[in-house]
Each structure stands twice: as C-alpha cells, then as structure tokens.
Image (spheres, rainbow, N blue to C red):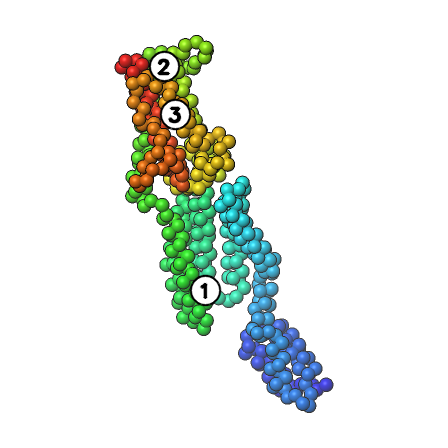
Amino acid sequence: MFSLTDEQIAFIENDIRVRGITSPDLSIDLVDHICCLIEDRLDEYNDFGRVYQETLLLFGDKGLKEIQDETNRLLTFKNYYIMDKTMKISGYISSLMILFGAFFKLQHWPGANAILIFGTFFLTTLFLPLLFILKFKSTAESNRSVLLSIIAFVSALLICTGVLFRIMHWPGARMTAIIGAVLLVLGYLPVYVLSVYKNTTNKINATATVIIIIAGVGLLVTELGTGITRPVSDSFWRGVTESNQLLTFTNNENLAVYTKHKDVSQVKDSSSSPDPLAMLQLKTDELMNYLDGMKIFLIAASAEISEEEAKKLSLDDLRSFGGDSRITELLIEPENAVNKYTAAKLKTMIESYQQTVKNIAPAADLSMLETGMLKVYGEPVAWEKANFEELPIPMVVYNLIRIQLSIRSCERAALNQITGS
C-alpha cells in the first residue's frame, strides 16, 4: 500500500478548505478519512490526482459542502431531526385530513367539519411553522431568502385560515384569505423574481412557480367573490331584513286582533263547534311553527351544525352560507320523503290551510298562497322547485319568510271578514 507524501496531504487540506470546510475538527477528520481512502486505492497504475477526484465522488453530488452543512445543523440545531420528522408527519396527516374532510364535506357525511378543522390546525400550527424554522436554521440564507420565507409562511397561514373560515362560515373569512392572497402576489412574487428567478438556471421550474401562484390566487379570489355582486347582495339582503321586520310587525298586529275580540289559546274540544277565531289561530300557528322549524333545520343542515347552534345565529350570519345541493336533497329528493321537513309536506300543509280559511272566511283573498306551477324565466316550474331547488340558504330563508308573510296576510284577510273590521 502506498503512503501519501506531506505535499499531497497539504494539498488535500487546502483543497477541502477551498470546498467550504471551515470547521477545524471536521477538517482533520475528513483529511484523515480521505487519506485512508486514497491510500487503499493508490498503486503504481493510478496517479494521485485521478484517485483523489474519484474519492471526492464518494461524498455525493453536493460533495464536502453537504457534510459541512450537516455538521452545522447538528452543532447549532440539536433537535433538527426530531423537528424534521415531526414536520413531515404533521404534513402528511394534515394534508390527508384536509383531503378526506373535503370529500366528506362533498358527500355531506358526519364529521367533515371536525376533520377539516383538525387538518387545518395541524397544517397551520405544526407543519408550516416547523417548515419555516427548519428552512431558516438549516442553511445560511441571504436576507432576501429569509424575507421570502417569512412572506411565504405568513401568506400560507392567512390563506389556509381564510379558506377554513369560509368553509365553516365563520366571520372574517373573506378578508383573511384576501390579505393572504395580496401578500402572496405583491410581497412574495416580487422578492421571488428578484432572488430566485433571475439567478436560477432552471427557468422552467421558476416560471411554472410564478404562473401557478398567479393562477391559484386568481382562482381563490374568484371563489371568494362568487355569487351575486356586493351591491346586489346588499340590496337583496336589505330586502330580506325588511321582510323579516314586516313579518314581526304583522305577527304582532294579528295577535292584537285576536286579543281584542277573544282570548283564544287552542281548540279544546274537537267534537264541539269550534270558534272561527280559535280555529284560524290554531291552524295559522301550526303552519307558522312548521316554517320556523324548517328554517332552523335547513340552516343547521347547510352549515353542518346542531339545531341549537342554528337557533343562535342571527339573520345577518346567513349572508355567506351555501348549501344549494344539500337543501335540494333534503327537501325535494324522494329518498328523504320520510323527513319531517320536506317541500311536498309544506305544500300539503299550505293547501290544507287554504281550505281551512275558505271554510271560515269564504270571501278572504288567498291568491298569495297559490301552490301551482310558477313561471321562472318564462318556463313553468313546479312550486317546490321554484322555491327550493339549487338555491343557497339565504334565498331559501327569504322564500320561507315570504311564504310566512303571505300566510299572515291571508290570516289578516280572514280576521277582517270574521270580525267585520
């Protein structure tokens, strides 16, 4: 076995220093290790230069610099591997939970909200912070690269949180997601172009990253702005609010008429001839209570919350709610005909109420409660579909309020005929 000369050993020491090995202890260990490898392979047929270059190839594509970086990570960041493993596990778990949560949400299966919440929680509190910390600590990055990482972390955190808030119909969803998207486009992209795009040799990957970010933000903003435009939405919701206020006023007005003429709570004996006012009030309250229950049922189903939670929501909380296909499924689809609340049962109850009012007050105008075919864009559509098919919960609630107003108006017409007022 050949031994290296002092000049060759000095050459190795100087070369590895040039290649980025700055730690004295690591330099000594590497020189000793490289010398052993070279001496094992060096013979009369192989010269030192070729054997030395072949030995360096044994250290991988990144060469000795990777060993220096790995050593720095171990010396300055002792928990690197634990955090790296935690980051990977949390990333896999959170991404799978979000994927399954989204699928459960589309299928309207129970547990969708909980899976999405926990998935996003792991993503935003474990994966993203650990990813940022590891990236920040593992390499000696420039100030521009550190700024890029910070902007990317904050943008991702805001967008993920905003999307979750929008899915859960929590307040602040739109603003949170938009701030994250703006920060990504106006903050991250310029820094990325300056620090990465101009200096990289792989222009295809860099260009793809820019395009994906712009397209993704465009799709996100489009999704956040779907539905009716803001001015129309405000105008429409003002009409919903005013209709609800008018309904409360009409309820109180009709109740005052009952109180003035007779104190009636219910029909006690169905075998006796019931008082017209008592019968009218009983049947009206029965139908109104059914409609109120239907509102709570549909709000709870569309938001995937309990009915007790749905009762606590104010009318304005419903502005961003969806539930189009879910409402259609619950109220119209034949497989849900056994449910307590369906469009067909509501239609039957309205028609029964019409007959009751006709018997009590034949001259009362009941045209507002017609349940026949309706014209929608010039085409005849069944009453159930016109009021409930593929409509978001704000529109469905408005239609239910409108039906309740029609009931109270017919009730008032009957009261005027019965009392002669």
Question: Label 3 amino acid?
Answer: Glu
Q: In 3D space, how far apart are the residues under numbered discs 2 and 1 (Cα atoms)?
A: 78 Å
Q: Is residue 288 left or right of residue 362?
A: right
Identify the element where label 3 is drawn. Answer: helix
Q: Earlier in the sequence, mark 3 or mark 2?
A: 2
Q: In 3D space, how far apart are the residues under numbered discs 3 and 2 (Cα atoms)?
A: 19 Å
Q: Nearer the viewer, mark 2 or mark 1?
A: 2
Circle 2/circle 1 CB separation < 8 Å: no
Question: Label 2 amino acid?
Answer: Leu
Which residue appears at 32% of the width and 45% of the height?
Answer: 229
At label 2, counting other C-alpha atoms closer than 10 Å, the crowd grade (few under 14, some 14-19, many 20 or more) is many
Residue 124's place in the image compared with 242, above or below, is: below
- 356 and 308: which one is in front? 356
Q: Which residue is mark 1?
A: 145
Q: Position of residue 321 (x, y in %)?
A: 41, 40
At label 1, counting other C-alpha atoms closer than 10 Å, the crowd grade (few under 14, some 14-19, many 20 or more) is some
Q: Position of residue 101 (x, y in %)?
A: 52, 47
Q: Give the residue at the far right of this rendering.
A: 1
Q: Position of residue 292 (x, y in %)?
A: 42, 28
Residue 328, quarter of the rendered image = top left
Q: Would you say residue 126 is visible in this rendering?
A: no
Q: Which residue is mark 3?
A: 351
Q: Give the residue at the far top of this rendering.
A: 272
Residue 152's place in the image compared with 140, above or below, is: above
Which residue appears at 33% of the width and 33% of the height?
Answer: 241
Q: Is residue 74 left or right of residue 369?
A: right
Q: Is residue 376 left or right of residue 150?
A: left
Circle 3/circle 2 CB separation < 8 Å: no
Q: Which residue is mark 2?
A: 277
Question: Label 1 amino acid?
Answer: Ser
Which residue appears at 46% of the width and 62% of the height?
Answer: 146
